[in-house]
């Protein structure tokens, strides 16, 4: 589904397109110029992960999701900030760099030969999100294993299966449940029957495999969400044409087929009894990301960004080349799941085109009031990256829209609670932002109670850092 085209645009590349070029410089922690005043209580490190190299040997990768990963970290302490930017050095990234050519198939890039498609292994681009767990830091990508990074200098320590428990894949979207003092994640395992492998990561203790759940076919599951009792998956009607892909007739992305006649399957997995999964149908839709979820009088309330179809995949691929040919279509929804009745009902919360929903980590898996998003200010921006930050009151539907500046493009806003705060929105939003007018990147600090006041401070890098997908906050020890 697309809407009417916006006004004709200049043939010149948009200024924001420079946010999708290779990281110009890799470096350790350096002092950052601070504009405004950083909160003295803000004490820890923001870590962001995303694609920072968009090709190898003169070949441009086929999709934004294919870029080789990099990590941006900003340390806040005593009203000052230091920033570091590093490329991530997995064995497969290193092998391609040394060979000077593409060796592996990836999401939107074909493997160069039948042998490579069958036996060449999976590329670890380590480019999607960051996970801090048990005093360790990891870069994640959903197709393979986590990559551990040094908390001290961001250097790559290596791929890990977390003591032999996880694999062959580990999603880039773990979700915490505060009441359980644990986080949860999954991996998709392809074979004769496609399986969801489920994992628990206690706040203190070793990772534990919960079990596996069969899927209805080779599909794409990017994210899920957890309440204090259940894990929730929306299995959209996207199916991978495996044999066509293995014959070299396109990449993974090229062979993801939208089949609305299949509908969406909702999976609800009891954490304490994962074999007793509930399955029930819903209308066809797609979701990349969830914000939060909670139990409510025997029902589950799930916040997510919903798309009418899989056209979003084309939109994401086209960002590397300038204005997309289609409009952004994601809108914030809240779904009500009645597991006993096997029913699914979803209501649109906002008509604003948006992505990257999040809430306070203090309410993860529990009822919350506020959702934070990166969004588009209006129709003229629907074919490019997000240009505003939005706070949504989930009780009233009221929106607070924050523009950080003309030509400024925010990544996912991350909420950091104020130590000792009582209100749900007592804290800060940290927002990695690309300023196309100066071709530099900064982290904006917003007071989450009053984001409409604008950034209380901006910590500037001396260069641009490509737009990232996801991040995490590491509280100072």
Image (cartoon, helix red, strand yellow):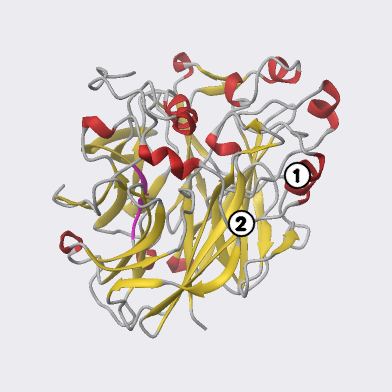
Q: What stretch is highlighted in magenta?
A: 355-359
Residue 350 in picture, x, y percent from top left: 21, 39
The one of 279 and 40 positioned closer to us in this rendering: 40
Residue 180 shown left or right of residue 249 in the figure = left
Residue 321 shown left or right of residue 56 in the figure = left
Residue 297 in view here: no
Q: Disc 2 to disc 1, how far (Cα)?
A: 19 Å
Is 90 colored magenta in this rendering?
A: no
Quarter of image, res 7? top left
- Quadrant into which the N terminus falls: top left
Q: Name the residue under label 1.
A: 97
The one of 139 and 37 positioned closer to us in this rendering: 37
Please name the residue shown 36% across and 78% down the image. 42
Circle 2 residues within 10 Å: few <14, some 14–19, many ≥20: many
Which mark, by number, is residue 139?
Answer: 2
Looking at the image, tell me whether mark 2 or mark 1 is earlier in sequence order. Answer: 1
Can you tell which of label 2 and label 1 is closer to the viewer? Answer: 1
Residue 121 in picture, x, y percent from top left: 80, 37
360 versus 391 height, above or below: below
Please name the residue shown 76% across and 63% down the image. 163
Please name the residue shown 27% across and 78% down the image. 421
Magenta span main SS:
strand
């Amino acid at each position: 589904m697309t809407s009417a085209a916006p006004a004709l645009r200049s043939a010149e590349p948009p200024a924001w397109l420079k946010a999708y070029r290779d990281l110009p410089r890799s470096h350790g922690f350096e002092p950052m110029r601070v504009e405004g005043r950083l909160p003295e209580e803000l004490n820890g490190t923001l870590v962001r992960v995303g694609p920072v190299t968009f090709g190898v040997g003169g070949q441009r990768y086929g999709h934004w999701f294919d870029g080789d990963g990099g990590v941006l970290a900003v340390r806040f302490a005593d009203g000052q900030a230091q920033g570091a930017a590093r490329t991530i050095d997995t064995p497969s990234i290193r092998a391609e760099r040394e060979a000077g050519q593409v060796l592996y198939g990836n999401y939107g890039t074909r493997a160069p030969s039948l042998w490579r498609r069958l036996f060449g292994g999976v590329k670890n681009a380590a480019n999607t999100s960051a996970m801090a767990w048990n005093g360790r830091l990891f870069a994640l990508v959903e197709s393979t294993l986590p990559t551990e990074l040094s908390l001290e200098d961001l250097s790559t320590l290596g791929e890990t299966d977390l003591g032999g428990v996880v694999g062959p894949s580990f999603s880039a979207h773990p979700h915490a449940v505060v009441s359980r003092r644990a986080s949860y994640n999954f991996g998709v395992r392809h074979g004769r029957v496609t399986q969801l492998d489920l994992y628990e990561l206690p706040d203190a203790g070793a990772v534990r495999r919960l079990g596996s759940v069969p899927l209805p076919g080779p599909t794409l599951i990017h994210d899920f969400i957890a309440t204090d009792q259940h894990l929730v998956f929306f299995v959209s009607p996207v199916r991978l044409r495996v044999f066509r892909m293995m014959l070299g007739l396109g990449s993974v992305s090229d062979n993801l087929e939208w089949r609305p006649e299949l509908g969406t399957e909702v999976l609800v997995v009891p954490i304490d009894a994962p074999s007793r999964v509930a399955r029930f149908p819903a209308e066809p839709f797609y979701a990349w990301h969830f914000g939060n979820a909670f139990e409510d009088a025997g029902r589950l309330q799930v916040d997510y960004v919903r798309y009418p179809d899989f056209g979003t995949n084309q939109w994401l691929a086209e960002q590397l080349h300038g204005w997309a040919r289609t409009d952004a279509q994601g809108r914030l929804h809240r779904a009500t799941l009645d597991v006993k009745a096997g029913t699914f009902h979803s209501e649109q919360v906002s008509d604003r085109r948006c992505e990257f929903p999040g809430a306070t980590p203090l309410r993860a898996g529990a009822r919350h009031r506020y959702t934070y998003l990166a969004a588009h200010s209006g129709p003229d921006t629907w074919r490019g990256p997000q240009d505003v930050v939005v706070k949504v009151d989930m009780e009233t539907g009221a929106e607070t829209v924050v523009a950080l500046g003309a030509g400024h493009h925010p990544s996912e806003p991350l909420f950091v609670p104020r130590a000792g705060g009582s209100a749900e929105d007592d804290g800060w939003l940290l927002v990695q932002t690309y300023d196309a007018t100066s071709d530099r990147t900064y982290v904006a600090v917003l007071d989450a109670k009053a984001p409409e006041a604008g950034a209380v401070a901006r910590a500037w890098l001396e260069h641009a850092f490509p737009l990232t997908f996801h991040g995490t906050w590491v509280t100072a020890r």
